[in-house]
């Protein structure tokens, strides 16, 4: 995005637990950086995280990116959905089940959106250490509308849950 200072800052969560999760995340971040009218401002490291919601599945890799975008929330969500589709994600699996790649819109500026299929901030953000740990790495002071600062939200989670989210060493080649 050439226009330097316009657009809205949004946070996007990435997760994968199938087919080389680390590489799925790196690829998705590359594609994200090429979205029209969207610039990636920062990304977290990738973290290993125990599966949340459905225990009997492989460990996840999670990361968070901060973007500035001129796309409206439904357009941005559609673009994230298209990245998932192009990466070969198969839909229709179990809720909270294994997936090749998942991109979730976590926050969109100070806005709150409640449309069918488009809820921002992400409704389960505050319960998820695999979101808050990487988000706190790149945006601890970010205020999640209606919920407060990211670092404070993270503090509220049980230490065992926070401590289970472990940064991966940087990859030499992706
Ligand atoms: N995503 C889910 C369900 N459970 N667990 C972890 N650790 N990371 C995820 O990204 C994740 C999950 C559904 O979106
Ligand atoms: Mg998700
Ligand atoms: Mg999703």
Image (cartoon, grey):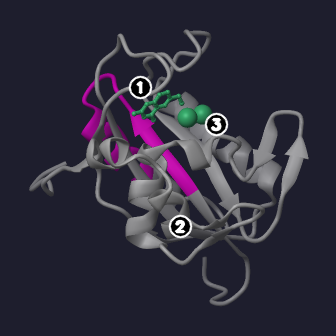
Seen in the picture, residue 94 relative to 137 is either above or below; the reply is: above
Can residue 141 be found in the magenta stretch? no
Compare marks 1 and 3 and give the one earlier in the sequence.
3
Report how far apart the C-alphas of labels 1 and 3 lie in the structure: 13 Å
Return the x and y of residue 146 as percentages of the image width and height: 78, 62
Q: Which residue is mark 2?
A: 152
Quarter where residue 136 is shown: bottom left
- Around disc 3, counting alpha carbons within 10 Å, would you say few (fewer than 14), some (14 to 19), or many (20 or more)? some
Report how far apart the C-alphas of labels 2 and 1 lie in the structure: 31 Å
- Around disc 2, counting alpha carbons within 10 Å, would you say few (fewer than 14), some (14 to 19), or many (20 or more)? some
- Which sits in the foreground, 83 or 150? 150
Asked if the residue at tag 1 contacts the one at tag 2, i.e. Cβ–Cβ closer than 8 Å, the answer is no
Q: Secondary structure at mark 2?
A: helix
Can residue 23 be found in the magenta stretch? yes
Magenta range is 12-30
Return the x and y of residue 144 as percentages of the image width and height: 67, 65
Quadrant of the rendering where the N terminus is positioned: bottom right
Q: Which residue is pictured at 59% across the width and 74% down the height?
A: 142
Tell whether 31 sits left or right of 45: right
Image mark count? 3
Q: Which residue is mark 1?
A: 100
Seen in the picture, residue 148 relative to 118 is either above or below; the reply is: below
Q: Secondary structure at mark 1?
A: loop
Eye-nearest disc, 2 or 1: 2
Seen in the picture, residue 8 relative to 82 is either above or below; the reply is: below
Q: Secondary structure at mark 3?
A: helix
Q: Which residue is pictured at 56% across the width and 42% down the height?
A: 127
Report how far apart the C-alphas of labels 3 and 2 lie in the structure: 30 Å
Asked if the residue at tag 2 contacts the one at tag 3, i.e. Cβ–Cβ closer than 8 Å, the answer is no
Q: Which residue is pictured at 29% across the width and 33% down the height?
A: 21
Q: Which residue is mark 3?
A: 81
């Amino acid at each position: 995005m050439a226009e330097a200072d316009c657009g809205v800052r949004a946070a996007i969560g990435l997760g994968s637990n199938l087919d080389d999760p680390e590489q799925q995340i790196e690829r998705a971040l590359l594609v994200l950086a090429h979205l029209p009218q969207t610039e990636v401002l920062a990304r977290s490291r990738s973290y290993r995280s125990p599966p949340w919601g459905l225990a009997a599945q492989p460990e996840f890799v999670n990361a968070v990116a901060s973007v500035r975008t001129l796309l409206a929330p439904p357009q941005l969500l559609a673009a994230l959905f298209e990245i998932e589709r192009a990466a070969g994600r198969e839909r229709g699996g179990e809720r909270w089940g294994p997936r090749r790649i998942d991109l979730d819109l976590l926050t969109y500026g100070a806005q709150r959106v409640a449309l069918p299929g488009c809820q921002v901030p992400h409704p389960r953000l505050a319960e998820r250490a695999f979101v808050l740990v990487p988000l706190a790495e790149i945006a601890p002071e970010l205020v999640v509308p209606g919920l407060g600062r990211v670092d404070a939200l993270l503090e509220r989670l049980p230490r065992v849950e926070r401590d289970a989210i472990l940064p991966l060493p940087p990859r030499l080649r992706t």
